[in-house]
Structure formats: structure tokens, C-alpha cells
Amino acid sequence: MNGYFICDRGRYGFDYTNHPQRPRQARIGKEEASLPQALRAVRERLEQIKKTSFSDSIASLGSTRGSLETQGMLKRLCRSKGWQDPIYFEESSTATKVDKAISRLDADVAISLREVEKADFILAIGADPLHEAPMLALAMRQAYRNGATIGVIDPRPISLPFPFLQIPSAPKDIDLYVSLLIKGVLDRSSVESLGQEAITFYDKIPEEYTLDPLFKEAFTTLGQKLRNCRRPVLVSGLDIVRLTTPDLVADHALLLKKMKERIGLFYLLPGPNAFGAALFSPQDSSLRNILDGIEKRMIKALILVETDPFSLFPDQGRLKEALEKLDFVLVIDYLPSRVADYAHIFLPSRTPFETASSFINQVGRLQLAAPVHAGGIPLSQISSGDHPPRLFHKEIPGGEPKAACEILAELADEISFSRDDLWLWMANENPVFANRSEGVRVSSGKKNGHSFSLDWLMEREGDWTLHDEFELLLVDWTFGTEELSNYSRPVRQVEKDPFLLIHRKDAERLGLQSSDQIVLHLDGGPLEVRLEVQEKMAPGVLILPRHRQLSWQKIKTLPGMILANEIKKKK
């Protein structure tokens, strides 16, 4: 399904497994302890908090990088103890968009990367394949080599290893441009068979719209190629788009399905197991809900399982203050993360390479991963790399960590951890987990998406900016922004320095030019960054990669809006 190539970030980004500062020993406070000692201390602290307050005073945060076993065991633990249900997303907007996407990925339209290669037309919508999903960019390249036309509707200066047509569009216009393009190739008669909602949806799309003359030719060409193709694919990003975009793209796939031999739909989900996280997540939940509870002193303890909110959550000031208010913080992870510094007790876990685990991929197929090595401290770190230690033990040095799901099972006071037992519990909670066969398609079982909704039009009516106001977009970049590969020494050697992208016309209006050091005056304080001026991007937006060397978390809310007079050249 995924082929045998991997991208450079995947090939060299696993270095966190052998990171010199990887935590391999449990800690109580700043003191190292055995895992049994630390587990006893965790139980005592949590029981004490439950006795002195109430069950809902204990919250937990999982992640999209955790396996299904870890995500499921965390929820089972919380249910067994009467704690709050765990949350798996930092932002409710992300949770909502993922929820909508997986609810619209039915077997008739969901396609794999191999199937993307067979497309004769691909339209990437609010997606930057090279930086957000390099393997998708490779599949698109293969499709191009087979004769496919590639189009992109996105505000960023997209770069791909093959020719393509781009319509630079601010996020607020993406839904409209996609709708105009697809309506232009549809016959109303083909829509009528889908029912009155589809007809109303079709009729409400404007007949025409003022488009920058520079891109009219590209828009016309894309329309002609889409009309004549047989196997189109719609690729939708979820990061920078509006809440309405996942549903809208799925609706257009349904419309095209009536005219085409085969239609494909591919979403860029955030994280290797975002699909699983959405299946376990409560509705409309996010880290912000937890922070609200902490600030109101309703939440006294927080359990963080293989997640570092500092790597993804804006408003680091609020996050830091909330963590300092808690009576107890438990962190379970294999990374030397920033949030681990706030842990009252830290429990080391194994990486995905060291334990059997399951994930659901972008297409909704279950994938099983076997452990490939036993872990432990690398020879280069334990003895300067020239000879193994001259002491002999039964255990592997540095091999104390357990899988996070096993640690959580022990906290649940289960006699022993059994994957079969856990999957049975998961299947009782949600029938989609009844079949554990590798490659099986997992239906979300959710009905959160609404076909042929007109919400996108209402959203657009209220989506406007002032003349001297920019939308500040936080984006991923191939190197320097992804959480796990940020711990990789080889990846760090090739990453670019932090930068901010701006359209040429906007730069000229502000009296700025490439390589200027500028200061953005944000809610969380000033942010200094180097400017890069671009031509092939949408005006009215600023594009800022979430670089690990940049304090982008000074942005408190997303989407971020910034006035022109808040962008200053450093003196």
C-alpha cells in the first residue's frame, strides 16, 4: 500500500531512539528511581488527589503519535478510575477537522498512495505535499510522469519536483476557488440524481468570481483538464484550511463521482495516528479545555502520555503557567521533551521501534508494526564506541523502559497486560476495532460530516480582514518543524534557519525586502525572524514555519491576525 520508498525525514528522523539525552530511567522529582517505585508513587499521588477533591480533577492528554494500544489503554485507564476522558488534540479546530475528514473517508473514494500514482488529474487543496507529506509528493510525481495534470490551490509558495499549476489563494478563498473550478466542469443534470441538497449546493456556488489576471489562464487550463480526465484525485490539507474545507472537498468528490470513472479523496492527517486519536476523542475537546480547568482550579493533576504540548500548542506562556499551578504532573514518554521538565514523576516508555503496536494510516487502513530491536543504550554512548562494557548482566543496559500501554495498564491495577484483552475492550467501546487484520479498512463509524452543507458560504461571509491586516499562518516545513525528527542530529544538519514569507507586493508596501531582520509584535511578545520575499504566494498572508529554533508559541490563538504596523524592520 505504501510502497518501499521512504522520504529523507523518515529515513534519518528516527535518531530520537538513540538520542544521547533520551530518558531511560524513571524519576521522582529530580531523583532517579526504579519503575516499580515510581509507579507506586504515582498511584499514591493520584489516589490522594482523588480523595481530597474529586475524580474529574484528574485529566490526561494523549497524542496523534501514540499507537492504538497506547491511545486505547489511556482511555481504559481513565474510565476504570472515573477520571476525565483523555484528550488527544491540542486545538479543537484540529480535532474537528480530523473528525470531519475521517467521517467522509468511505471505501468508494478513499485511496492509497499507490492509487494516487494512477490518477490522471490531482488537485491539492490547502496542502503543501513536499513539506507536509513528502511521500505524497513522490506519488504525485509518479502520476505526473504517467501524464497527469497537477494543480494546487494554496497560499504558500509551493515547490514540487515536477511542473504544476498553482492558484495562490488565501485560506478564506480556498473553498470558493475549489467550488468555482469544479462547478465549471459539472452538468447540472448529473447533480440532480444526488437529491435536492446537492442541487441547492450546486446552485449556491457563484457562477463567476474576480480572479487575479495572472492566474486566470492556469484556472482555465485546470478546468479543461479536470473536465477531460477520468481518474481525478482531490487532496485536502487540514492544517491551514477553514473548518468547512474537509466537508466541502468530500462534497465535490461526490459530485465528480457521477461523471468520472474513479474519484479519489486523500486527506493529510496531522500525525501518524491522528485517525486513531479521533476515534478515541470526545467531541469538541482540546488542550484548551484542560487549561481552562486548571486555571479554575478544577483540574489538579495532569497525565501526559507521549506528547509534548510545547511542540504544537501556541501560547506557551499560558501553558507554562498552567503546568506550574498543578498539584501533580505525570509524564510518560521516550523523548527528552520540554514538558518532561515539569513532571513531578517521569516514566520512560519505549519507542514504536521497540514494541509491537498498531496504527491507522491516512486512508483508514489498520497497520501493524513489530518491534525491530530491543533498545537499550547504544554502544557509542555507553563505552565510547570502542568496546562493550566488561561487566555482564542479564538485562540490557538502559533497557528498563516499557511500552506506554503496559505502563498505563499497571496504573489501572490490572494483573497483567494483554493486547487481546485490550482490543476486546476497545471493540466493546467502538465496533470499528472488532477486526484486527492488517490492512483492513477501518470505518470511523462517525457521522460528523454533513454532505452538501452550505456552511462554507456562511463562513465566507463572516471571513474578512482589514486592508492593513495580515493572516499569520503557522505551517510545517520538511526539516525543522516536525516533532520527532527535530531530535535527529542528521536532520538538524540540513534544516534552514527560521524565516517568515511575505508576498512581494506586501513587502514593497511595508518598505521591506528579503533578508531583512524583522520584529513581529505578537500577543505573547516580540518575535524576531528573517524575512523572505516571494512572488508565487497569496498576498495578505504571512507564512511562518513552526521552526524548533523559533519562539512561534508567542502566538496565542489561531488563525493569527496581525496589523501592518505590528511588523517592523529591526533597527
Image (tube, helix red, strand yellow):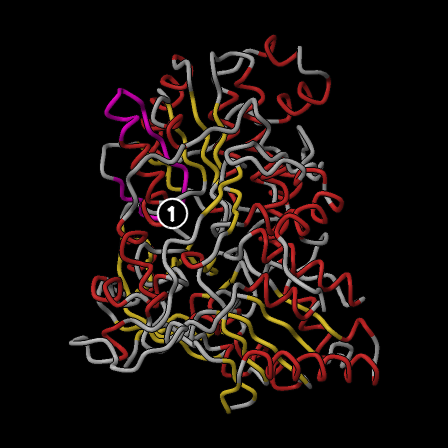
Q: Nearer the viewer, residue 102 or 210?
A: 102
**84 to the left or right of 510:** right
Residue for badge 1: 538
Q: Is residue 520 above or below residue 467?
A: below
Q: Quadrant of the C terminus?
A: bottom left
Name the spot of residue 165 as percent of width and height, x first.
31, 32
Of residues 253 and 15, the one nearer the viewer is 15
Mark 1 lies on a secondary structure that is loop
Please name the residue shown 59% across and 78% down the image. Answer: 318
Vertical side of 495 occupied by 422: above or below:
above
The N terminus: image quadrant: top left
**Res. 396 image quadrant:** bottom left
Q: What is the x, y in percent for residue 451?
A: 67, 29
Residue 527 lies in what quarter of the image?
bottom left
Answer left or right for 379 relative to 77.
left
Q: Judge whether 352 appears above or below 298 on screen.
A: above
- The reply to whether residue 217 is in sight is yes
Percent from the top left, x then y, of residue 537? 34, 47
Front residue (pair 392, 370): 392
Looking at this view, name the residue that lies furthest to the top: 189
86 magenta-colored: no
Circle 1 crowding by C-alpha within 10 Å: few under 14, some 14–19, many from 20: many
| Residue at 63% over, 34% down | 443
The reply to whether residue 555 is in sight is: no
Tag 1: amino acid? Ala
Question: Compared to 80, does 504 lie above or below?
Answer: above
Q: Position of residue 463 (x, y in %)?
A: 59, 49
Residue 488 falls in image quadrant = bottom left
> Number of numbered discs present?
1
Q: Is 148 a magenta residue?
A: yes
Q: Which residues are magenta?
A: 142-160
Q: Nearer the viewer, residue 9 or 352?
A: 352
